[in-house]
Amino acid sequence: MRVEKLGHAMPLFLSGEEFHRCSHDASLVAEKADTFIRDLHRQLETVKAQADASAITAEQTCALFEQKYITLNAEFGKLESQNAQLTSTLERLAELAEVQAEKHQLHLKAIAKDGEMRKRAAEY
């Protein structure tokens, strides 16, 4: 890779000043290029390692979310079942209250009829 500067090709791995100092010695330029390339490889390996670590972290986080979802889904199922049972119990209690109210009304009517019968019996 080269950058054109003032009509001269200048490598990207050397500053203009370094290029001027080294341009007469090809082995020195090659050594600097090798050093630059090794540094780029180290940077690449570091970025790959960071990406791998991020991928592992993402997988672990995903696994935790999946487990939490399974747990919450099971809990939700239990709560739905409890809700259905409570709704059924509430309906039975409402029916029982209605029957008890009817029983109470019948008892009041029976008392009223008994009182009426005693009154008639007393009149005869």
Image (cartoon, grey):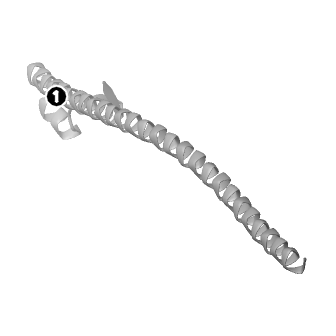
Whether residue 6 is visible to the viewer of this picture, yes or no, is no
Residue 58 lies, with reference to residue 103, above or below; the image says above
- Camera-side residue: 61 or 114? 114
Residue 109 percent location from the top left of the image: 79, 67
Residue 5 percent location from the top left of the image: 34, 35
- Position of 4 with respect to 73 (left or right) is left
Residue 52 lies, with reference to residue 108, above or below; the image says above
Residue displayed at 27% across by 35% down = 57
Residue 3 percent location from the top left of the image: 33, 31
Where does label 1 land, which residue?
42
Q: Quadrant of the N terminus?
A: top left
Residue 96 percent location from the top left of the image: 64, 54
Write down the quadrant of residue 67 in the picture.
top left
The 10 Å Cα crowd at callout 1, few under 14, some 14 to 19, many 20 or more, is few
- Camera-side residue: 91 or 122? 122
- Camera-side residue: 10 or 42? 42
Numbered circles on residues, count: 1
- Position of 2 with respect to 39 (left or right) is right
Identity, as a three-letter code, of the amino acid under mark 1 = Arg
Where disc 1 sits, the SS reads helix
- Position of 121 with respect to 15 (left or right) is right
- Position of 22 with respect to 105 (left or right) is left
